[in-house]
Amino acid sequence: MKQLIFPLAALLLLLTVFLSQSRAEDLKLLEEEARKGDVNAAFLIGNRYFTGNGLPQNFKAAREYWEKAARAHHRDALCGLGILHARGNGVAKNLEKARAYWEEAARLGQRDALCGLGELYFTGNSVKKDYRRAYSLFERSASRGNRDAIFMTGHMLEHGLGVQANENLAVLLYELSCQKSSKDACTAFTRLTERLSRKTNPPSNERAKRNP
């Protein structure tokens, strides 16, 4: 077994070098396409800088590339710029600017922008708190598969915020969001499932009180 250690280490080193070269070549191609005006390439480069995927994380560079794509109304780039301004990544935190970017992206159907706007109206940050508007935005985002929006739609249905309360529908949405790896949704699903179960099948001592 010891004889395999060096060959295995050498193989891993070669694989690392190959992947590094592959990423560099891929990035070079993307940069060439971005210079030619390809907005999707500009967005992808910005996304790499934002996540630090194959490049050192650099929010300023991400903003610059996303701004290029946003000028052509690239909805994901618009949403990304909203996130940068909402979090204060590489720019001064500015929820009003974030809202403006998200509103434009939302008009183009970008699901994460719809969710971001929903959060603003739910919390009342930079806008007047409006649960009905928040619910509508979360519902639209949820219909497009946004995990957090699915959870928030369930939360608002459970508590009757901006919509008529419906615990049975809420628990289904919590389950769906939980399946998408939302820890908050998993906790809410377990809690609400247990509460609904107690309503349907109360303990024997409670049944005795109701039927003496």
Image (cartoon, rainbow, N blue to C red):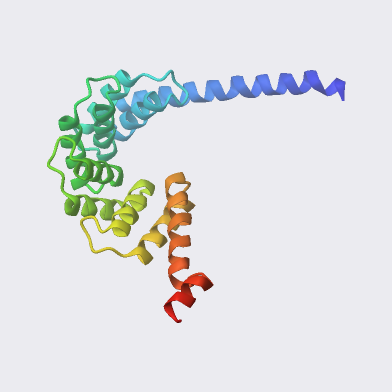
- Residue 107: x and y, percent? 18, 47
- Residue 130: x and y, percent? 16, 48
Q: Is residue 79 left or right of residue 21?
A: left
**7 is higher (above) or lower (below) than 98:** above
Q: Nearer the viewer, residue 26 or 175?
A: 175
**191 is higher (above) or lower (below) than 15:** below
Query: In percent of the image, x 48 and y 55: which residue is there?
Result: 190
Point out the residue furthest to the bottom here: 212
Query: In percent of the image, x 35 and y 48: which residue is there?
Result: 146
Point out the residue furthest to the front here: 212
**159 is higher (above) or lower (below) than 21:** below
**131 is higher (above) or lower (below) than 201:** above
Q: Nearer the viewer, residue 184 or 33?
A: 184
- Residue 46: x and y, percent? 34, 27
- Residue 57: x and y, percent? 40, 20
Residue 96 seen = yes
Number of marks drawn = 0
Question: Which quarter of the picture shows residue 85?
Answer: top left
Query: In percent of the image, x 53 and y 73: which residue is there?
Result: 204
Q: Nearer the viewer, residue 85 or 205?
A: 205
Q: Is residue 208 left or right of residue 122?
A: right
Residue 144 seen = no
User: Looking at the rendering, in which quadrant would you find the N terminus?
Assistant: top right
